[in-house]
Amino acid sequence: MLSAGNNGIEFELVSDVAKQFGDAIKETITDVLNTYGVTDAAVSVVDKGEFS
């Protein structure tokens, strides 16, 4: 989920692999948001693992 933010890009990440892949997930999302010129957003991510 993405909603308006006030303090840059803020994340709420729920993932079983957040310790291993959390930084990469956040970096990918930040790159996409930057491509679209989004500088302030509250991002909520629920990662359920890989696709089968």
Image: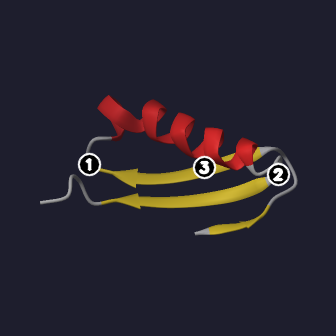
Spatial separation of the CA atoms under disc 1 and disc 3? 16 Å
Q: Position of residue 37 (x, y in %)?
A: 82, 48
Local crowd at mark 1 within 10 Å, few (<14), some, or many (≥20)? Answer: few
Q: Position of residue 49 (x, y in %)?
A: 23, 53
Q: In the displayed structure, would residue 9 be above or below residue 51?
A: above
**Tag 1 and tag 3, C-beta contact below 8 Å:** no
Left/right placement of residue 24 relative to residue 42 reads left
Q: Of helix, strand and loop, which one carries label 3?
A: strand
Q: Residue at x 40, y 61 (%)?
A: 46
Residue 6: give its label: none
Residue ID for mark 3: 11
Q: Of helix, strand and loop, which one carries label 2?
A: loop
Q: Of helix, strand and loop, which one carries label 1?
A: loop
Q: Nearer the viewer, mark 2 or mark 1?
A: 2
Local crowd at mark 3 within 10 Å, few (<14), some, or many (≥20)? Answer: some
Residue 16: give its label: 1
User: Which numbered disc, 1 or 3, marks the residue that appears first in the sequence?
Assistant: 3
Q: Amino acid at mark 3?
A: Phe
Residue ID for mark 2: 40
Q: Amino acid at mark 1?
A: Asp
Q: Position of residue 24 (x, y in %)?
A: 44, 32
Q: Nearer the viewer, mark 3 or mark 2?
A: 2
In this view, the residue farthest toward the right is 6
User: Which quadrant is the N terminus positioned in?
Assistant: bottom right
User: Which numbered disc, 3 or 2, marks the residue that appears first in the sequence?
Assistant: 3
Q: Residue at x 33, y 51 (%)?
A: 15
Q: Position of residue 8 (x, y in %)?
A: 81, 44
Compare residues 10 and 27 and report the one nearer the observer: 27
